[in-house]
Amino acid sequence: MSRPISLIQFLIEEKRAGHINAQLSLLIEVVARACKRISVATGKGALGGVLGNAGTDNVQGEAQKKLDVISNEILLEANAWGGHLAACASEEMEDPQPIPDMYPKGNHLLLFDPLDGSSNIDVNVSVGTIFSVLRCPDDVTEPKVDDFLQPGTEQVAAGYVVYGPSTLLVLTFGHGVHEFTLDREHGSFVLTRRNAMIPAETSEFAINMSNQRHWEAPVQRYIGELLAGKTGPRGRDFNMRWVASMVADVHRIVTRGGVFIYPIDAKIKASGGTGKLRLMYEANPMAFIVEQAGGAATTGRERIMDLQPTALHQRVPVFLGSKNEIEIATRYHVEADDTRE
């Protein structure tokens, strides 16, 4: 029986293969260590006094949970002093966080959603952390917002951590997607799946059906065909799954296939929005992971990772998962747009 491979050993292998450098390896180690602390905090639940609202709003105007604030502080503190970052940005903060002058600076930028799905915390449903890593532009010593506004194709790493029955880290450097499980007895992440692949075909979809009346025609068409099942044009039955925690829904897709959809709709448009999910903190890192696992990720009209960001907290529609289904949903949008023209 082969010996288990720890995250540290895996990172050393990646360095030897020339896939990452020492700074990026250290960055991932630090993020993983911070996520272990978040895992402990979420695991205590009511016993740790971490449930409920913090009484504050984030930059999006959304009520923060206590664990949102705690998780954000854990990640900021962990990444401040290691010398691997030039700056970081969080979904919970309006502006990027510079590295304090007392510490050395690296040449990477870190973006993160410290606790995705936090509305589920109080009911003990899986939540998670999502992160994305970019290179800091050359000769930039004090990164500003514009330095973060790079398309998803420029990501050098992305990952998410699921805090569920077990704590899982899913990671890519652009050379496949790999899953690590936290061994709580030894306190280390251990490689449990290498080169995860999303099946091109699927019979599962995830979408918030309560918004159906607000959807655009192409989404109505696509979901309508799935709901019609064997008697409809698709000729087979589909199952719906919806956790309302992006990390949990995407991890199910990475594990066994499926599609995740959060489209733009009339309700979002009426409020002046361009989508629900954040491009830099959610859509780009998840798109990178899904594509590396053989899936696809679009806005319904174009590839997510090709988008040129215009704002740090920009929102976009998201269609991701099993490649063949995402291609169909995207084609329906393109056809509808062509018809209107």
Image: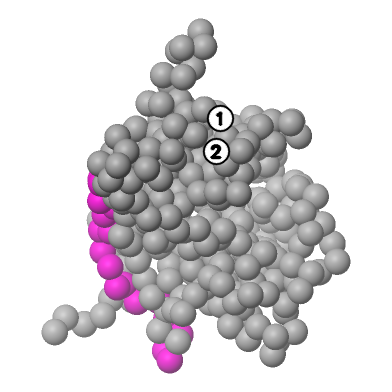
Judged by depth in the image, the label closer to the viewer, 2 or 1, is 1
Compared across the picture, whether 262 is left or right of 192 comes to right
Q: Say whether residue 198 is visible.
A: yes
The picture quadrant where one finds residue 35 is: bottom right
Query: Marks 2 and 1, Cα distance to the nearest angstrom?
Result: 8 Å
The image position of residue 83, as x and y in percent, is 58, 60
Q: Is residue 260 above or below residue 333?
A: below
Q: Is residue 192 above or below residue 220?
A: below
**Which residue in the protein does label 1 denote?**
216
> Which contiguous range is marked in magenta?
185-201
Q: Is residue 282 above or below residue 16?
A: above
Is 196 part of what is drawn in magenta?
Answer: yes
The image position of residue 205, as x and y in percent, is 41, 50
Cβ atoms under marks 2 and 1 closer than 8 Å: yes
The image position of residue 270, as x and y in percent, is 74, 31
Q: How crowded is the residue under tag 1: few (<14 C-alpha within 10 Å), some, or many (20+)?
A: some
Which residue: 70% across, 48% down?
A: 96
Which residue: 37% across, 71% down?
A: 180
Three-letter code for the amino acid on which mark 2 is drawn: Pro
Q: How crowded is the residue under tag 2: few (<14 C-alpha within 10 Å), some, or many (20+)?
A: many
Three-letter code for the amino acid on which mark 1 is drawn: Glu
